[in-house]
Amino acid sequence: MATDLNTAVGEAVETVRRQGWVVLDPAAVARHDARFPDAIDEAEAEVRRLLADTPTGRDNFEGFRTQRVYALAGKTRAADPMLVHPVVTGICEAVLGAGFRVSSATTIAIGPDEKAQTLHYDAQVYPLPRPDPQVTVNSMWALTPFTEANGATRLVPGSHTWPTGRRPPADVATVAAELTRGSVVVYLGSLWHGGGANTTGEVRVGLNLEYAAGWVRQQENQYLALPPHHTSGVPDDVLKVLGYSTTAPFLGYVDAREPLRFLEREGLR
């Protein structure tokens, strides 16, 4: 299994570095984590529960017909299998280095009649040159089918190699990341992309889980989303990738301890 996983990660990394993204279908996802495909059913049920009380977006970027559930790690454990899927995290370690962590964990539900989102790239929140260093990797899990008609993420081929200052023209060609339910698309933070327009009567629901190198600040404050007194019962691997861990040589320690050891000392584990 280890060799099979290493091969799968190696092939995925090669594809994502060359193309800017890679798609893992449901069979590939389940091959390396026995919790799938049941984890998809559980996540969809939980997300739909959360969406019932979630308003639509506040501006054009969020989408006035799009619902976003932020801070997922503090609201449900149903997304945990996706947060730590071994192929996705293997890609992250290869691209971002050891000690990477979840930057943001969000549900994005694009409703009928939503317009296409403005093209952007995730790493632009950091004042760093393009295209390297790569400091973010994003993943979008399909809890419902993604089609070009219902708002599948639009990807700009080759844009992960563009230098600082280059922007996509208005007529830039994009590829719709069409996904069967239970698939995931993983793409580099330097890749220009955006949610698609939804011209159907259905809602396109995905889990948008973004990762960042351990030496840059997470977009979402995971320590408030999932504070120490709420960590009991959360698996260690999930806590580590959320940021309750150190990045070499010693970024992120607490009282000269690994964060998990600190939580144990304080009786929180």
Image: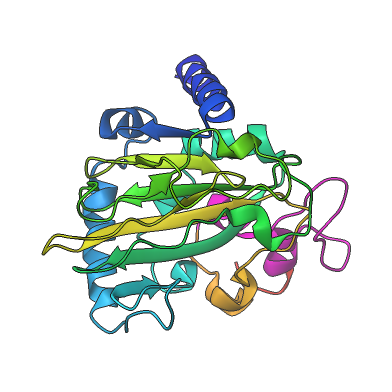
- What colouring style does the render use? rainbow
The one nearer the camera, 72 or 197, is 197
Where, quadrant-wise, is the C terminus in this rendering? bottom right
Percent of width and height locating residue 114: 27, 68
Q: Residue furthest left?
A: 201
Let me know if residue 241 is in the magenta part.
yes
- The residue depicted at 24 percent of the width and 59 percent of the height is 204
- Quick check: 46 left or right of 195? left
The one nearer the camera, 97 or 55, is 55
- Quick check: 107 left or right of 255? left
Number of marks in picture: 0
Percent of width and height locating residue 190: 62, 45
- The residue depicted at 19 percent of the width and 64 percent of the height is 203
Percent of width and height locating residue 145: 20, 48
As drawn, 214 above or below 223: above
As drawn, 109 above or below 3: below
The one nearer the camera, 153 or 91, is 153
- Quick check: 53 left or right of 195? left
Percent of width and height locating residue 228: 62, 75
- Quick check: 28 left or right of 16? left
- The residue depicted at 32 percent of the width and 74 percent of the height is 67
Where, quadrant-wise, is the N terminus in this rendering? top left
- The residue depicted at 23 percent of the width and 80 percent of the height is 52
Quarter-wise, where is residue 130 in the image? top right
Let me know if residue 263 is in the magenta part.
yes
Which residues lie in the magenta part? 235-264
Quarter-wise, where is residue 162 in the image? top right
